[in-house]
Image: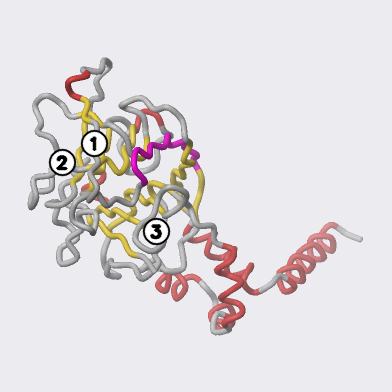
């Protein structure tokens, strides 16, 4: 058998293998080719944390020249949902390479500070970004949240998790607002046709891995993506319900930011969303 014959046979074998693959796997493979991006997934570890570690919950740092973050309607101090120390984790495109991002939410209004009429309003929650992380800790700048009988948070009382980072790649999720656009643009007609089959879609759904906590990549929702199709917002941070964490009825919390604001490290216009079953 000549060299060209061997190449032809190899190509034919590849085509036969492709035809034998389940449609869901072929769809997923194509989506992977055209939409895969770098992101950071986090494991939540019940370990002792330093005040400037990447973590969920716990005490937080307030610089001397800043006031304590509060719910602007009630005046009550906000709770640290999570913070990311960018010097501790691998760098991904557009995200800061250093600094500390703190995400605060409310525990005294029943909805964790979210204004459902204006998801950008940081009156009941807020983000703070410290470009320079202090080398030494001034204990007078450390705030420990005080719980009361009426405190309502997605985290159980006194819950703190260290965030163990993993640089990984992620394929666009099925309820991302841009999923249909990617399908229409990059999938051939045969694959689009088999996507009309509910069984194929169930199998495709099983190929996606839900990530309990992440920055970057693609979001998921228990309801729907609040963004519009022409929106250029990307996933800043996401935290799912899991042991000791519960958003309403097994929901998920997401934060979105425009690419331009992210590059400029401007966290004043961020969309906060959480939904549940």
Whether label 2 touches label 3, CB < 8 Å? no
Tell me which residue sits at (31%, 27%) in the image: 52
Cα gap from disc 2 to disc 3, whole angstroms:
28 Å
Name the element at disc 2. loop
Residue 28 horizontal/vertical position (percent): 57, 65
- What range of the chain is rendered magenta? 156-167
Relative to 87, is 22 above or below? below
Q: Earlier in the sequence, mark 3 or mark 1?
A: 1
Q: Residue at x 58, y 70 (%)?
A: 204
Q: Residue at x 25, y 52 (%)?
A: 257
Say which of 166 and 188 sits in front.
Answer: 166
Mark 3: few/some/many CA within 10 Å (<14, 14-19, 20+): many
Q: Quadrant of the C terminus?
A: bottom left
Residue 219 left/right relative to 120:
right
Which residue shows up at 54% across the image and 84% down it? 196
- The x and y percentages for residue 199 are 61, 80
Which residue position is annotated with label 3? 219
> Secondary structure under badge 3?
loop
Percent from the top left, x then y, of residue 193? Answer: 56, 84
Q: Residue furthest right?
A: 1
Q: Give yes or no for contact between labels 1 and 2 (Cβ–Cβ under 8 Å).
A: yes
* Other residues around mark 1 within 10 Å, as few (<14) / some (14–19) / many (≥20): some
3 and 1 marks in contact (CB < 8 Å):
no
Q: Which mark is residue 77?
A: 2
Left or right: where 273 falls relative to 23: left
The alpha-carbon separation of the residues under discs 3 and 1 comes to 29 Å
Quadrant in the rendering for residue 10: bottom right
Is 157 inside the magenta-drawn segment? yes
First along the sequence among labels 2 and 3: 2
The mark found on residue 145 in the picture is 1
Q: Nearer the viewer, mark 2 or mark 3?
A: 2
C-alpha distance separating marks 1 and 2 = 8 Å
């Amino acid at each position: 058998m000549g060299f060209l014959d061997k190449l032809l046979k190899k190509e034919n074998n590849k085509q036969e293998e492709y035809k034998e693959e389940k449609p869901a796997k072929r769809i997923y493979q194509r989506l992977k080719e055209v939409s895969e991006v770098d992101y950071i997934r986090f494991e939540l570890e019940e370990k002792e944390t330093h005040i400037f570690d990447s973590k969920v919950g716990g005490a937080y740092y307030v610089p001397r020249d800043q006031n304590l973050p509060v719910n602007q309607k009630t005046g009550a101090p906000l709770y640290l949902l999570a913070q990311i120390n960018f010097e501790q984790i691998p760098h991904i495109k557009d995200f800061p390479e250093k600094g500390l991002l703190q995400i605060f939410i409310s525990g005294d209004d029943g909805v964790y500070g979210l204004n459902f009429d204006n998801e950008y309003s940081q009156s009941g929650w807020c983000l703070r970004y410290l470009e320079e992380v202090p080398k030494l800790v001034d204990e007078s700048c450390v705030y420990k949240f005080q719980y009361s009988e009426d405190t309502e948070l997605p985290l159980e009382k006194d819950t703190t998790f260290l965030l163990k980072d993993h640089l990984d790649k992620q394929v666009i999720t099925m309820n991302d607002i841009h999923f249909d656009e990617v399908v229409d643009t990059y999938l051939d007609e045969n694959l689009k046709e088999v996507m009309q089959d509910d069984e194929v879609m169930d199998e495709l759904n099983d190929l996606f891995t839900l990530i309990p906590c992440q920055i970057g990549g693609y979001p998921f929702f228990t309801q729907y993506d609040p963004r519009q199709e022409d929106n250029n917002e990307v996933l800043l941070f996401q935290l799912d319900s899991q042991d000791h964490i519960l958003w309403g009825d097994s929901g998920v919390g997401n934060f979105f930011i425009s690419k331009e604001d992210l590059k400029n490290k401007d966290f004043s216009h961020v969309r906060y969303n959480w939904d549940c079953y």
